[in-house]
Image (spheres, rainbow, N blue to C red):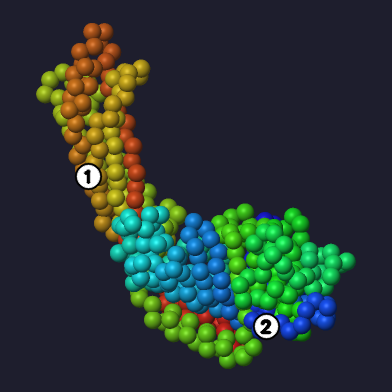
């Protein structure tokens, strides 16, 4: 879609900006030569073997990253949430995997650090697949040289610094008077870096470029991932360095392959949004009763796993409500839970629980005592399902083969 393309274009630009280099910039605006158009810089990014990102952004958490991106999205490095780190392995077109300790998952899963999240033990210390396309608000593929470079070329059709205004000075020294924080270069980038503002209508942010040849992209700052309506990242501040030694990319791919080959047979899966279990439910009290009325009912749940690859256990919480005639007041008549074992793709499982409540016989007797003989209790249930123990095959050998193929395609 057009919006997604714009989003990725801007995010890619982010990476490019950071890539430019980390050396101090000698001289000032007066003795620096005009930098080339962004299209030229984007072309250099596209041919880079590896980009090394460092920086942070915010979602509902403070996210700090130290990532190496290669090709069209392969990524290896670390991410920290509120200061607690985890290892990241992202295979472009394959999977995004995380391995963090207890503190990382507590910070990632709980809105209240003082309140332990019950799912933390399931993830802590284990490789976990992260299913969301946006990794803590940012699509990792957009940070890779093979994606970012071409999109940077497209993002600045005018190719001029300062938002494509050709009359603007080639070098825009930063001062405290520039206002918004995103208009300031990221920490570690010299204040004399050239600012390429994202063109109007394409987002809010700036790329920072070394005014000295070879005009490396140094960083990106922005209020979000520009042009991407699905991005949940804000206050982005990134620097990036392009690896000049080809061996760096080769060694990084070798480390990623070894990591993939060392994965366990199955991985945990974080917050899958996909439908895993289809279920049927049965069991309700009668509509009326005059004597020896039941005060409980057995509810049965049957499920079938319709996922192609995910296995999961599930916990059903079932509430029952009764209403005496259609115009009567609805009363809650209890709840129960059904815990089902891990169910593999294509498999079925079932379980039951009992709901007991004194209002069940009371409503039944009242219905039977209707002098006009029209008394009826209308029953309904409400159910919620929570998944646990969601796992998937790691495809370790497949991911390693994919990484080797990507490395070969890139000439590493």
Q: Quadrant of the C terminus?
A: bottom right
Compute the Cα span from label 1 to label 2.
Answer: 69 Å
Q: Nearer the viewer, residue 132 or 371?
A: 132
User: Element type at marker 1?
Assistant: strand
Residue drawn where x is 27% and y is 15% of the image: 375
User: Image quarter for residue 29?
Assistant: bottom right
**Residue 65 horizontal/vertical position (percent):** 52, 71
Residue drawn where x is 50% and y is 87% of the image: 254
Q: Residue 345: in sight, yes or no? A: no
Residue drawn where x is 21% and y is 43% of the image: 353
Is residue 13 depicted above or below 306 in this figure?
A: below
Describe residue 22's horizontal placement relative to residue 293 as left or right: right
Describe residue 212's horizontal placement relative to residue 296 as left or right: right
* Circle 1 or circle 2, nearest the eye: 2
What's the mark number on residue 24? 2
What's the mark number on residue 352? 1
User: Image quarter for residue 313?
Assistant: bottom left
**Residue 95 horizontal/vertical position (percent):** 48, 70
Residue drawn where x is 19% and y is 22% of the image: 362
């Amino acid at each position: 879609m057009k919006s997604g393309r714009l989003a990725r274009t801007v995010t890619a630009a982010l990476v490019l900006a950071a890539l430019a280099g980390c050396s101090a910039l000698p001289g000032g605006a007066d003795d620096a030569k005009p930098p080339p158009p962004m299209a030229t810089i984007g072309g250099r990014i596209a041919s880079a073997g590896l980009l090394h990102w460092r920086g942070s952004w915010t979602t509902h958490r403070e996210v700090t990253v130290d990532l190496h991106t290669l090709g069209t999205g392969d990524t290896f490095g670390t991410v920290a949430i509120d200061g607690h780190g985890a290892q990241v392995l992202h295979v472009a077109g394959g999977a995004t995997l995380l391995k963090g300790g207890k503190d990382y998952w507590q910070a990632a899963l709980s809105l209240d650090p003082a309140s332990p999240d019950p799912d933390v033990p399931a993830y802590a210390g284990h490789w976990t697949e992260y299913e969301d396309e946006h990794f803590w608000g940012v699509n990792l593929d957009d940070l890779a040289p093979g994606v970012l470079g071409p999109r940077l070329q497209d993002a600045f059709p005018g190719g001029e610094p300062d938002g494509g205004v050709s009359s603007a000075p080639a070098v825009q020294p930063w001062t405290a008077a520039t206002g918004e924080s995103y208009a300031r270069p990221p920490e570690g980038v010299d204040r004399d870096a050239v600012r390429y503002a994202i063109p109007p209508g394409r987002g809010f942010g700036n790329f920072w470029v070394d005014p000295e040849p070879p005009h490396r992209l140094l960083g990106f700052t922005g209020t979000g991932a520009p042009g991407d309506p699905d991005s949940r990242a804000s206050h982005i501040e990134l620097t990036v360095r392009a690896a000049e030694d080809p061996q760096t990319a080769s060694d990084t791919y070798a480390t990623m392959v070894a990591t993939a080959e060392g994965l366990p047979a199955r991985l945990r899966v974080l917050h899958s949004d996909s439908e895993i279990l289809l279920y049927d439910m049965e069991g309700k009290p009668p509509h009326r009763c005059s004597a020896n009325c039941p005060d409980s009912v057995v509810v049965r749940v049957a499920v079938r796993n319709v996922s192609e690859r995910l296995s999961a256990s599930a916990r059903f919480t079932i509430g029952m409500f009764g209403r005496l005639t259609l115009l009567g007041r609805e009363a809650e008549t209890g709840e129960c839970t059904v815990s089902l074992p891990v169910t593999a793709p294509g498999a079925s499982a079932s379980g039951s629980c009992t709901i007991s409540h004194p209002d069940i016989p009371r409503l039944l007797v009242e219905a039977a005592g209707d002098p006009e003989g029209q008394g009826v209790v209308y029953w309904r249930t409400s159910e919620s399902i929570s998944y646990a123990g969601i796992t998937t095959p790691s495809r370790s050998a497949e991911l390693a083969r994919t990484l080797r193929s990507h490395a070969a395609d890139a000439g590493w």
